Image: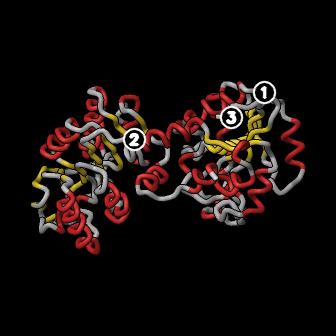
Amino acid sequence: MFDIELKNKDVIVRVDFNVPLDSNLQVSDDTRICAAVPTITSLLEKGAKVILLSHLGRPFKDLEDNGNFKPKYSLKNIINTVSENLKRNVVFIDTPLTEDRIKEEIQAVDPHNVILLENTRFYKGEEKGDRELAHKMASLGEFYVNDAFGTAHREHASTATIARYFDKDHKTFGLLMEKEVTNISKVLNDINRPFCAIIGGAKVSDKITLIENLLEKADKIIIGGGMAFTFIKAQGGNIGKSLCEADKLDLANTLIEKAETKGVKLLLPLDAKVTEEFSNDGLYLTKPIGEIPDGWMGLDIGEASISLFEQEILESQTILWNGPMGVFEFANYAQGTFEIANALSKATRRGSYTLVGGGDSVAAISKAGLEDEVSFVSTGGGAMLEMIEGKDLPGLSAILE
């Protein structure tokens, strides 16, 4: 980060503290807060006064009946968790940015403390990239640090527009942002082959651009999760009442043909655990993936698929994983996803580079207790995908301008 004198300087840091809260409005997963600690600590060690900006949820889409914001969207709920992680006092200021007295309140805070301002999405201009709002945010500090990779793909006031009010000597990436960009670049520009991409999740439509871009880079692509059934159906298989996007059957066949033309091995599941109801309870069987009886649905990959996928993973040097293999939230249908996590762990120990990204994949590898046994776990699902898809990330480009 900054190689200049920051003692007694006010530094605005955009973090991604969009964390889940339980029914008691307590942080239930502090992963994103922990990830921001190195940047904040480094700035404090340089003598800077740190002013944190973050969003939390989508408050305008979930207002109370009287039009007020619901209490669960206030960042005051995370103060204790942020303080515990930083091991120092965190001062919460809920004064609106539109009021001039906020500057006086910031200046009154002891520089050894960290300042956290209220949810940036309490302002309508935030998600619109409003220049006036961004200018008010920028006026609160002399330097700007963007450490919120999870929002880097958004052209928001606090992530992109604000950066344009600082020259190149007064803005930079945080340590987390640098780490994210460096690690994701390894599956874009610095690939050790064979390169295997594992793509799961519910819908092909959510991953079209990702798969098309990976067809230009990967040696093999493993397709799992609900989206696999659209490919199987397109190839003439019987998938019962498994999840399927009927309007994407031609697309699935096109992707299969593209993979063949480019010499990319596109691997589909061989079998599936099937059941009659979308529930963890009840009878389940393992059936060949294209022979699922009418009235039954696939909720996980079977043993033959696990064995095939594990072999392909262990023979790869670079591995990207985005999306679960099944409904891992149900214990009876978690095996496929957890075995993929185990395979990545084994590959990492053998020297492969393994990158995990996307909300469900991160949740799955954490649930499996293997998040420390892969090369890197990305905190930014959407941002990571858009970067791999080759799209411009405003939060990055605004810093580099």
Is 231 left, or right, of 189 in this rendering? left
Q: Quadrant of residue 372?
A: top left
Residue contact between numbered discs 1 and 2, judged by CB atoms under 8 Å? no
Name the mark nearer the viewer: 1 or 3: 3
Separation of residues labelled 2 and 3 (CA atoms): 25 Å
Residue 21 image offset from top left, x and y in percent: 56, 44
Determine the CA span between mark 1 and mark 2.
37 Å
Give the amino acid at mark 2: Lys
Q: Which mark is residue 112?
A: 1
The vertical placement of 366 against 122, above or below, is above
Which residue occupies 25% across, 52% down?
A: 224
Q: Would you say 295 lies left or right of 31 here?
A: left
Asked if one can make out residue 47 in the rendered structure from this viewpoint, the answer is yes
Say if 380 sits above or below 157 in the image.
above
Instruction: List the residue tagged with mark 3.
Output: 2
Dividing the picture into quadrants, the one containing residue 115 is top right
Residue at position x 32%, y 58% in the image:
211
- Contact flag, marks 2 and 3 (Cβ < 8 Å): no
Q: Amino acid at mark 3?
A: Phe
- Residue holding disc 2: 186
Q: Amino acid at mark 1?
A: His
Residue at x 64%, y 34% (from the top left corner): 1
Foreground label between 1 and 2: 2
> Is residue 25 visible in this depiction of the protein?
no
Tell me if residue 230 comes above or below residue 353 in the rendering.
Answer: below
Left or right of residue 34, residue 50 in this image: right
